[in-house]
Image (cartoon, helix red, strand yellow):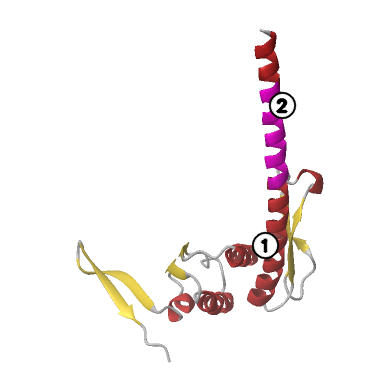
Amino acid sequence: MCEQRLDLENTMAKLRDMITEITNNMKTRFKEKMEIINQNFGQTFQELFGGGEARIILEDEGNILDCGIEIEVQPPGKKLQSMGLLSGGERAFTAIALLFAILKMNPAPFCVLDEIEAALDDVNVNRYAEFLKKFAQGTQFLVITHRKGTMEVADTVYGITMEEKGISKLLSMKLNKK
């Protein structure tokens, strides 16, 4: 019985050591990736907004795996503030900047965006569309939208029409870009 108990205690100690090592690895990797995302976020925010500043702040640096994340932004001509104090369009544009900051760090071959620019005004829709077009050189995007500015930069547009009541028809158009 004493040998079995000693064996169990040794196994438990090994498991605790492994868990500690894995947790430390997770903390290190998370911190490294957050720094990259933060840097990308600032750059993407400036590009989309035409200036300003943005950053991600961990609420508790000592407990990075369980703490909250604060997003502070300063659109051009405004003071530094929490994302929660922005207008709906500014919040949406900030979220778009964060999404692309993450995609810059870890590009995906394919991405679906469903009306993420719906809350933006026409000027910012055009900025988003131009940014998306540049970004699309490394990632293929399927964009669901009703916004004219976004559709104008697309290579191909698909739509549904109902020429006769109850009969839907799929249309596609390849757009020639000059």
Q: Are marks 2 and 1 in contact (CB under 8 Å)?
A: no
Return the residue at label 1.
37
Residue labelled with disc 2: 13
Quadrant position of residue 11: top right
Q: Residue furthest bottom?
A: 178
What kind of residue is marked 1? Answer: Ile
Residue 72 vertical position relative to residue 173 in the rendered view, above or below: above
Specify the quadrant that holds the C terminus.
Answer: bottom left
Q: Give the residue displayed 68% in from the left and 57% down from the top.
A: 33
Residue in the image at 67% along x and 18% along y: 7
Residue 130 image offset from top left, x and y in percent: 54, 80
Q: Which percent across, then down, holds residue 4?
A: 65, 13
The residue shown at (69%, 63%) is 36
Residue 78: % across, % down: 77, 71
Q: Residues within 10 Å of mark 2 (few under 14, many from 20)?
A: few
Towards the viewer: 129 or 105: 105
Is label 2 in a helix, a strand or a loop? helix
